[in-house]
Amino acid sequence: MANWQLHPAYQALVPEFHSLDQVFALAGTPVTRDPISDVIRIERHGIGFYIKRYWNRNHRRGWRDYLRHPRVQREWENLARFAAWHIPTASVVANGLERRQWGFVRGAMITREIASTESLATLAERADPRFDQPGWVARISRQVADITRTLHRQRFAHNDLKWRNLLVDHNDIVYLIDCPTGTFWRGPFLQHRIAKDLACLDKLGRRHLSSAQRLAFYRHYRGNAPLTARHRRQLAKVRDYFTGRD
């Protein structure tokens, strides 16, 4: 059984998006690929689209196939959450999946390209001169802090909050994308995942930002309240999170 939804605004624009079979038959510019998914980019009528496709290559039916949402479904649901929380993100054009005997077989999600954007990771890799502009760094840092605080106040952790998943456009607006493993947590599990999110951000942060800029990010994330002993313990946990893990 296949379930496929195409956003009404795109019904006439891209005929190839009208079914899961059509989407899996599409060819485009490869972006990423792994054993269970691929991402391609295509352009139609001057608009870029990213197509992310997942499949259960071995058609196994483990208990996880029945008890939890497939990865692709979690991804489009999380993007919808970001939009509802007023976090700039990619627009979902179409999404759906196919099950057989209630087990996941394949699924796909199509997002509209966010024009004139590059990831923070790409900007850092090429040593973009804007990193030498304190005002620009502060504007971007505050937006990332606001996004991160919004997630965590919802008891939600991204679980892969890296610079590659943060896009910046020509107006210096930050967008959060790619979240197939993010979910809600509580108690000590939430605190652990919050530390992981912050540590993922700081992994490149410590290489490209000054100590003062990193501390300014954390202060803004905490609402600019005075740092307490609890906050300092959290900072130590963030600092040491990847020790022995890399």
Image: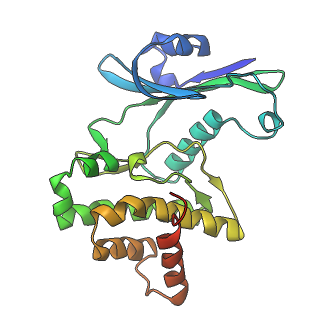
Looking at the image, residue 2 sits to the left or right of residue 14; the answer is right
Specify whether residue 108 is in view: yes
Above or below, 95 relative to 19: below
Above or below, 130 relative to 107: below
Looking at the image, residue 53 sits to the left or right of residue 32; the answer is right
Residue 3 occupies quadrant: top right
Residue at the (55%, 10%) spot, across then down: 22
Residue at the (50%, 78%) spot, across then down: 236
Q: Tell me where residue 60 appears, x and y as whole percent.
A: 78, 26
Looking at the image, residue 14 sits to the left or right of residue 35; the answer is left
Point out the residue furthest to the front here.
Answer: 244
Specify whether residue 52 is in view: no
Above or below, 234 relative to 84: below
Give the camera-side residue of 11 and 173: 173
Looking at the image, residue 148 sits to the left or right of residue 74; the answer is left
Q: Tell me where residue 79 appears, x and y as whole percent.
A: 53, 42
Residue 34 occupies quadrant: top right
Q: Tell me where residue 104 appears, x and y as whole percent.
A: 74, 27
Give the camera-side residue of 132 and 141: 132
Residue at the (61%, 33%) spot, across then down: 72
